[in-house]
Image (tube, coloured by chain):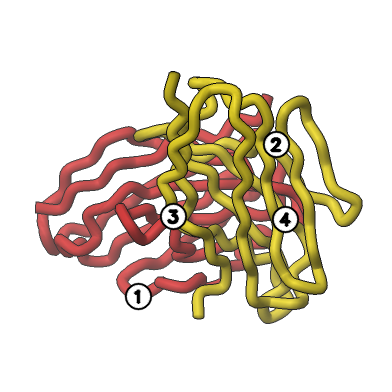
Chain colours: A yellow, B red
Amino acid sequence: RKEVEQDPGPFNVPEGATVAFNCTYSNSASQSFFWYRQDCRKEPKLLMSVYSSGNEDGRFTAQLNRASQYISLLIRDSKLSDSATYLCAVKGFSGGYNKLIFGAGTRLAVHP
Amino acid sequence: DVKVTQSSRYLVKRTGEKVFLECVQDMDHENMFWYRQDPGLGLRLIYFSYDVKMKEKGDIPEGYSVSREKKERFSLILESASTNQTSMYLCASSFPADGAFFGQGTRLTVV
């Protein structure tokens, strides 16, 4: 089983739609959680951290469910410019050190 | 702004060559990471370092080694390049509990 799993998509949604992605992780000792955005042929960019209490940044809301070991990202009022691949990342101790592991990403395509 | 700089955007090397990929960050981050990214496989962790001269294997360390002699610099070494090491290589750095920031990536082709 992969340490971090995501539905690869693609999610094809119209402009203005609300879309949600989930990401599951297997290591219950994981400590920090993040969402990244990656555009085609570019490096991943940190979108937001995910806190136990949830985190909201404009149209983006991230949540953590420790009991079920998943994090989610909700995008409201989708824009064409939101089209990208969204990667979740989990940081936790592995052998005593901070290891950052990524999911394979979920592709989002927003159409007019 | 955080800056993570990788020495080359594109690199073409021959099979059997020793290849050095350099990464420098300017944020005094303790943690540094090397990943490779391949279509359908996502970002896979090769090696990471949590402090100067400290290194830990990631999920796919075979055929690679690393060096971290100074805090700001983390080098990835392909001891003897092979065609299956053709990939996009991404370096990242972070504080221990924070998200990581990436360099622009090096697209390596081994022929």
Distance of mark 1 from mark 3, alpha carbons? 27 Å
Q: Amino acid at mark 1?
A: Glu
* Label 1 crowd bin: few (<14), some (14–19), many (20+), radius 10 Å: few
Residue B62, numbered circle = 1
A51 or B59: nearer the viewer: A51
| Horizontal side, residue B94 vs residue A86: left or right | right
Distance of mark 2 from mark 3, alpha carbons? 33 Å
| Horizontal side, residue B108 vs residue A78: left or right | left
Q: Amino acid at mark 3?
A: Pro
Residue at 91%, 51% in the rendered image: A53
Look at the numbered disc 2 and give the secondary structure of its residue: loop
B66 or A67: nearer the viewer: A67
Q: How far from the left and from the top, in percent, is residue B87?
A: 28, 52
Residue at 77%, 25% in the rendered image: A58
Residue A8, numbered circle = 3
Which numbered disc, 2 or 3, marks the residue closer to the eye? Answer: 3
